[in-house]
Amino acid sequence: MSPMPRILHLLSQRPSLTGSGITLDALVRHAATAGWDQQVVVGVPADDASLQVGGLDTDRIHTLRFETPELPFPVPGMSDVMPYRSTRWSDMSPDQLREYRQAWTRQLRPLLDEFTPDVIHVHHLWILGSMVKDLSPNTPVISHCHATGLRQMRLCPHLAEGVRQGCRRNEAFAVLHSEHAHQLRRDLEIPEKRIHIVGAGFRQDLFHRRGRPGRLTPRLVYIGKYAHAKGLPWLLDAFEKLRTASPDLELHVAGTGTGPEAEALHRRMSAMAPTVVLHGQLNQAELAALMRQSTVCVLPSFYEGVPLVLVEALACGCRLVATDLPGVAETIAPRIPPTVIEIVPRPRLQGPDTPVTDDLPAFTQHLAAALKRSITAPPPDEISLEFFTWNAVFDRVERLWLEALKPTM
C-alpha cells in the first residue's frame, strides 16, 4: 500500500442532489483532510458540465454519461421519483440493463488498472454495488446502504437475487440505522459482524442558528421530492385544515420532481399560492437560510433512511414533525429532547411506501394535530448534535476503510 492510501468512490447517479450524493461529497471532503488519495466515478446526464464533488480537482472526477448513443436513456435513479430526469429501474428493458452493465464495465476497468485503489467505497446496494467484485475481486469493498436499494429489491424482484448474490461478496456494509442492519441480515444473509451503523451527518458550517430572527410568524417548511411516498398530498390536506384557524400560516416547499405524479402535485401547490410557496431545488446554503426563517420542519414520509433534513432543521432552530420512520424513532429521537419533535404514526403500507387508503383520513388528522401543537409551541433551545456531524460520521466510516486494509498494511 502507498503512503497515502488510495480510495475509489462509486455513485451510480448524480452527485449532490440526493442524500447519497451529499454523503459522497462529505466523505470525500473529510477524507482529503485525513490524507486519502481519492478518485470518484458518478453517473450523470450527457449535458452535466459543472461537476463538483468534495472539492476534488476535476481530473479526479470521472463520469459515466447517459442520454448518449451508448446509453440512450436518462440516468437510472435509486428512487422512482428523482429531483431530475431519470429512468425507473422497474421500467428498464433487458437491453437497457445489459447496456448499463457493459457501460460501467468499460468505464471502470481502465481506471481500476491505472489507479489501483486500496479500497473501494460504493454507494447503494444495487446493480453497480453487485458488480464491483467481478471487476476487482482482490480489492476490499465497502457497500454504503442508503435504504433505496432495499426498496428496489422489492419493486424489481427480477433483479433482486442477482443484486443479493453480487453485493454479499463485499467485505463490509455501512448502514444508517439498526432497521437497515436487520434487513441486511435477513434479506442478504450478511453476518452481523460485517454490518456497521454509521448514521448520517450534517454540515455545521451551513446549518446553524446564527442570523435567525428572534420572532417569526408560524411557517412550515417541507424539503423533499414531489411524491406520494413522501406523504406530500396528505401534508397539503393537513395544511388546508390548519389554515382555517391560522390564516397567516404558510407552507414553504423546497424540492422538485418529475413524472405525472410530481406534475399533479406541482399544479395543486401552485393553485394554493400565495400560502404555499414553491422554492424549487435549493443548494445547501439556500436551504439552511430557508430553515432559519421557518418555525416547523415537517417530514410526512412513508419511507426514508435517516432523514438528515430533520437534524439540519433542528440545528437551524426549527421544531420537528415527522412520521415514525425507523430512522426517526431509532436514530434521531433518542438523541434529541422529546419536547422538540412530534412523531406521527404512519398509515399501514402496501409494499414499501404505498399507504392503505382507509388509513389516510386518520393519518391526515394526526398530522394536522401535531403541526398545530408545534406551531403554537416555543422555539427549541439549542442542543448538541455532535453524533450527527460529518466529523463523527466520517470517523465511523474511516474505521471501516482502515479495518479493510489491515491485511495489507
Image (cartoon, rainbow, N blue to C red):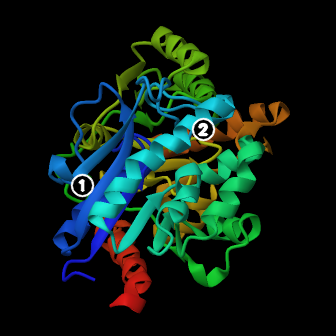
Tag shown at residue 98: 2
Relative to 60, 280 lies left or right: right
Question: Nearest the camera: 229 or 110?
Answer: 110
The answer to whether residue 147 is visible is: yes
Q: Nearer the viewer, residue 8 or 259?
A: 8
- Of the numbered discs in the image, which one, if any, rests on residue 208? 1
Residue in the picture at 70% in, 65% down: 183
User: Closest to the observer: 199 or 170?
Assistant: 170
Q: Residue at x 32, y 56 (%)?
A: 111
- Quick check: 160 left or right of 38? right
* Quadrant the N terminus occupies: bottom left
Residue toward you, 372 or 144:
144
The quarter of the picture where residue 171 lies is bottom right
Instruction: Look at discs 2 and 1 and give the one toward the viewer.
Output: 2
Using the image, determine if residue 38 lies above or below residue 344.
below
What whole-number distance in Å separates the C-alpha atoms at marks 2 and 1? 46 Å
Dot 2 crowding, Cα within 10 Å, few <14, some 14–19, many 20+:
few
Q: Is residue 239 above or below residue 376?
A: above
The disc label shown at residue 135, or none: none
- Residue drawn at x 72%, y 51% is 160
Query: Where the C terminus falls, by quadrant?
Result: bottom left
Q: Residues within 10 Å of mark 1 (few under 14, many from 20)?
A: many
* Sequence-first tag of 2 and 1: 2
Q: Amino acid at mark 2?
A: Arg
**Figure quadrant of residue 364:** top right
What amino acid is found at the position of numbered circle 1 in the picture?
His
As helix, strand or loop, the secondary structure at mark 2 comes to helix
Task: Say if residue 312 shows up in the picture.
Answer: no
Quarter of the image holding residue 165? bottom right
Residue 130, percent across and down? 58, 58
